[in-house]
Amino acid sequence: MKKHICLLEGDGIGPEILAQGVDAITTAARKTGHELTFAKALIGGAALDATGEPLPSETVETCRNADAVYLAAVGGPKWDAANPEKRPEKGLLGIRKSLGLFANLRPAMLMPELAGACLLHPKTAAEGLDLIVVRELTGDVYFGEPRGIIMRDGLRTGVNTMLYTEEGIRRIAKVAFETARLRRKKVCSVDKSNVLETSRLWREVVIAVHKDYGDVELSHMYVDNAAMQLVRAPSQFDVILTGNLFGDILSDEAAVITGSLGMLPSSALGDDGPGLFEPTHGSAPDIAGQDKANPLAAILSGAMLLRLGLNIPEAASLVENAVRQALRDGFRTFDIMEPGKTLVGCRAMGQKVIENIGKAY
Ligand code: NAD
């Protein structure tokens, strides 16, 4: 079967890591009888430089015409001083909105091969960690109105509005329960309902949606406690369901305790239309162009694209197993380097993965 993918390389290490991801998913798809075609489009700083816009309309069009969108990362110091409308990150928020993406799925898993890089106490790490944060993407303080820096009672005052509709909560809750059904059937909904009205509505709606998912266990936790429990006892979590702001922070926390940002994939899904698949990390301008970046988060995002975006789970497993094998064989980029392992760069790590995909079966 032929599938079409829109590639958004973005900035910094984006082009380097995405090149490895594209080779890996092309090889895995071919092995399982599928052909992938690609079209590149501009986003972020690269798009600003070329067109003056962080998200040109042609990019939105190219994404909409694809079966899935594969993004690397945007941003960098070159564009930091730009006005808020002309910042690379606007491109990212814009494409999520244009594609109607409202659910961000971010897995955090401790691979046994990388236990040494885990930041947790060895006793806690030994209990393992395999969770997924389901974060709402379209509501909350990032989009709620009114917003701005205003004058109030003669004082300059910053205003943002935490805003959720019942429907917005219902659809993300469904994604969390459906995701849990494919895993260990546990959802922990994280809110701040002791203080926030938005959270009280959140909890009420999540409980109502749960009535259709009797086979899934539901618990609730305040966000401050969740931040602590992620470090103290992360093995208790299967699916963490949360809003945009809390999810932004908790998913980074969950991610980083596993070792390196360079290992963590993510996906953003909507009701229909293409999903967006991207590594969790940013554009790492400090190491861009040096062939040092870890391409595994991008490659594993490619595996999510194959599984969730194109429904080719067998190709996704090929990629994931090939990554594990490269790590088992002792290859490490600098960010996950340990004594006794072999240091490789971005291209060489990508090649190891592709060789392993080639050897499979
Ligand atoms: P970052 O994730 O780019 O980098 C943080 C640290 O992690 C850096 O030291 C970097 O070298 C390292 N790192 C990140 N990815 C790595 C990889 N694949 N391999 C090895 N090391 C890696 O975050 P930052 O420095 O806060 O932000 C840099 C730029 O990226 C900013 O412009 C920011 O706005 C942008 N950003 C974009 C996204 C995105 O596109 N989704 C996400 C976060 C930050």
Image (cartoon, grey):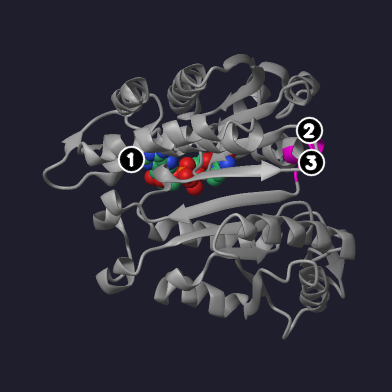
Q: Secondary structure at mark 3?
A: helix
Is the residue marked by circle 2 packed among few (<14), some (14-19), or many (20+) residues within 10 Å? some
| Residue drawn at the location 63% of the way across and 39% of the way down | 308
The image shows a total of numbered marks equal to 3
Residue sitting farthest toward the bottom: 194
| Residue drawn at the location 70% of the way across and 29% of the way down | 54
Left-right relation of 41 to 12 = right
Tell me: residue 282, above or below residue 165: above
Viewport quadrant of the C terminus: top left
Left-right relation of 304 to 121 = right
Amino acid type at circle 3 is Lys
Decide whether residue 98 is among the magenta residues. Answer: yes
Q: What residue span does the magenta drawing correspond to? A: 96-101
Decide whether residue 30 is among the magenta residues. Answer: no
Residue to which mark 1 is pinned: 324
Q: Secondary structure at mark 2?
A: loop
Going from the N terminus, do you reach mark 2 or mark 3 first?
A: 3
The image shows residue 333 at horizontal and vertical percentages of 28, 37
Mark number displayed over residue 273: 2
Query: Is residue 213 something one can see in this rendering?
Result: yes
